[in-house]
Amino acid sequence: MKIGIIGTGYVGLPSGVGFAELGNQVTCIDQNVEKIESLQAGKLTLYEDGLEELFVKNIKEGRLRFTTSMKEGVSGADVVIIAVGTPPHPVTKEADMKYIYAAATELSQYLTGYTVVANKSTVPVGTGDDVETIIKKTNPFANFDVVSLPEFLREGFAIHDFFNPDRIVVGANTEKAANVIKELYKPFANKTKMLFVKRRSSETIKYASNAFLAIKIHYINEMANFCEKTGADVLEVAQGMGLDSRIGPKFLNPGPGYGGSCFPKDTMAMAYMARQNNVEMSLINAAIEGNKARKKQMAERILEAVKDIEAPKIAVLGLAFKDGTDDCRQSPAMEIIANLLEKNANITAYDPKAMGTACQLLGNKITYADDMYHPLKDADVLAILTEWKQFRELDLQKASMLMRHKNIVDCRNLLDAKKAVEAGFKYQGIGKKAEPSTSESSTHQTEVA
């Protein structure tokens, strides 16, 4: 099939590479000239595990092209996928639809033959109707259908998820459009559930799913606070909860709150749509407010660890919102750092992939390190904010020798608390009481005796 994809971000680019790998002729379209020139030169503009190899392969084999020309990408296409951003409106926090509407207006001029226009961006309920109206108004003679084709790609795992989807949801109001999407996803027909629903139901499914997962994260973080007060271990509690098939183990990892390009904006957009329809959604609103507070709580924990130290130096490991990506949008790490900077904190940070994107956001407000041991030199506290695998392998003995004061605030529960204490650290994870250093334990035992 011939496919045009509008947008080369964290959805459009992995999707384009994936569809090309399946044997389709794919043209990715973007207005950003610099980005397109980079992609045409074989240089990726974002990091996704496993993306580069397939990107290079499909360019060389002629199935994947990039252009700034809407006409070039849309004319003759069987399917045109809209994968542009829907950022939150700065005031109302509703999804900002200007990029969707602009894409619909421009693409409509170049439709030739029957074309399925698929909204892959996360869009409010009724957007398919709006796009349909725009295309009909701009090009009354166009032969097309609009479908909702929500994406469920996890950042950091987008390529894996593209080829191993747990479900494919299609909102199609005509059988003709549904058949085109069936053909598009034919390679997955025997291994993946395809759900065909009304277009408005499909648009709701994406928001409903993300809001539910955000609520689940907020819940386990509140439970972590409870465990810290009562002496329970939230990791053991989460394990026991996850064994219940009605609950499941996923998204029961306590931490510094949810972030990224999806959960924050999608929960706010869902809350806005609920208000517009006079529907009370107290759980979503509680998750939104609780998640904001969570970042401040984590910053306060870090500052509490060095409250008696003059001009403390804070070492930060992790800037991306999660492992496997360089995306810092709505990153809990970045928000925690922002809270620390309000207290004039001296911060040196390291991230395996997100140094460049973090620097674009923070500038020279913090110091950037070359590796994960550099920030530890003469540091008074180590804060782990992103769950990169390599941080689990931190040499605690080496860290202990580098740091001035032995404090760890592990916001991701990556390190072994027992080993950290044995290395002389006062260790605080999430969802269980802080572990004093071995020296503090010895002192306490002597005092009790």
Image (tube, rainbow, N blue to C red):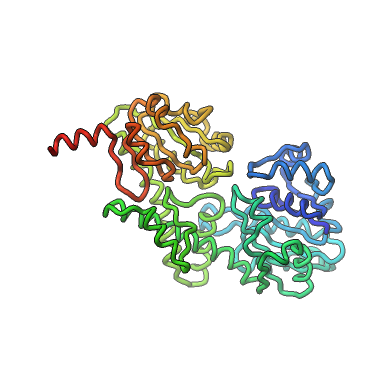
In the depicted view, which residue is nearer to us: 109 or 377?
377
Is residue 137 in view from this perspective?
no
- Vertical placement of 80 versus 201: above or below? above
Answer with left or right where residue 356 lies relative to residue 31.
left
Coordinates of residue 191 in the picture (x, y in percent): 69, 64
In the image, what residue occupies the spot 49% across and 63% down? 212
In the depicted view, which residue is nearer to us: 206 or 99?
206
Answer with left or right where residue 372 lies relative to residue 7.
left
Quadrant occupied by the N terminus: bottom right
Coordinates of residue 400 in the picture (x, y in percent): 37, 28
In the depicted view, which residue is nearer to us: 139 or 421?
421
Coordinates of residue 423 in the picture (x, y in percent): 35, 32
Coordinates of residue 259 in the picture (x, y in percent): 50, 50
Quadrant occupied by the C terminus: top left
In the image, what residue occupies the spot 64% across and 49% down? 10
Answer with left or right where residue 24 lies relative to residue 376.
right
